[in-house]
Image (tube, helix red, strand yellow):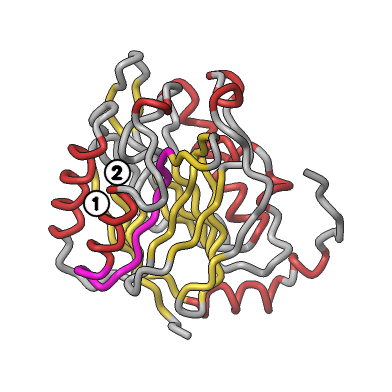
Amino acid sequence: MKEKLNISYIQADLVWGNPKANRLQFQDKIRSVKQQVDLFVLPEMFTTGFTMHPKYVAEKMNGDTINWMQKIANEVKAAICGSLIIEENNSHYNRFVFVEQNGKISTYNKRHTFTLAGEHQVYTAGTEKIIIDFKGWKICPLVCYDLRFPVWARNVEDYDLLIYVANWPKPRISAWDTLLKARAIENMTYCIGVNRVGKDINGHQYTGHSVVLDGLGESLTSISENEQIKVVELNKNHIETIRKKLKFLDDKEVFNLIV
């Protein structure tokens, strides 16, 4: 088990519908980080932007982006994660992909598709919440709209780190800020939210506000509305200490979630 985990998030503008261009830009940004990093976190649909036309840009699990993630993870000796559009069994998924240095892949399909934009009409919703065991840390990966559904994120697994990747637009950015803080506090966990910046082809503007929060909801990073690369050290002792002292998770309800 690793007591301390160095996380780097990359808040970037995205090239609309161009996986190759986005891979190249993230490759350069990842390689520019000179500090030792255990995990790089990229935004939602980091190869395309948030599109409702998946058939033009969807990839397979043995496609270029997955192969690229494995190659770069091995090169920089760190895991890489983010969501992208995957086609599988004649369906499209907004899939969170976590690739480790040794090539191991863990995946989570976004449960709450964004009905306001019609995501539910073109993407198949996931049905399974997963916990990734990475260097002794239990990580719960979620995607964008999942942030509005606290029951789905409820920490019944005693996870240590909650990660949200997103394309969360400027008009509702205060909700992003507030809900991330709430998820950290109520689950007594580190919480990372990684959002994009820039404007997409539909005119939607994104202002970042990516952040790392500790288990008491305190921010460990400064808010930026521009492209940004941050490296933050997480300490397992922080989670263990506050849970032992405050014991709030001991009072959580036991329930079965039917999906």
Going from the N terminus, do you reach mark 2 or mark 1 first?
2
Any mark on residue 11, and which? 2
Residue drawn at (34%, 43%), measured in percent from left and top? 223
Q: Residue furthest bottom?
A: 1
Q: Are marks 2 and 1 in contact (CB under 8 Å)?
A: yes
- Distance between mark 2 and mark 1 Cα atoms: 6 Å
Is disc 2 surrounded by few (<14), some (14 to 19) or many (20+) residues within 10 Å? many
Is 23 on the left-hand or right-hand side of 255?
left
Residue 77 sits above or below residue 202 on the image: below
Name the image quarter holding residue 179: top right
What's under tag 2, amino acid-wise?
Gln
Q: Amino acid at mark 1?
A: Ile
Which portion, as a residue range, is magenta? Answer: 74-85
Q: Is residue 47 above or below residue 98?
A: above
Q: In this rendering, does residue 209 appear at all?
A: no
Determine whether, in the image, residue 169 is placed left or right of residue 10: right
Compared across the picture, whether 212 is left or right of 25 comes to right
| Left or right: 199 in relation to 254 | left
Query: Is residue 168 in view?
Result: yes
Q: Which residue is mark 1?
A: 229
The x, y position of residue 251, in whole percent, is 83, 65
Name the element at disc 1: strand
Pick whichever, 222 or 31, lies toward us.
31
Between 258 and 66, the one lying in front of the other is: 66
- Identity of the residue drawn at 55% across and 31% down: 123
Q: Nearer the viewer, residue 67 or 235?
A: 67
Which SS class for mark 2? strand
Identify the residue at horizontal 54%, vertical 35% (top origin). 90
Q: Quadrant of residue 165?
A: top left
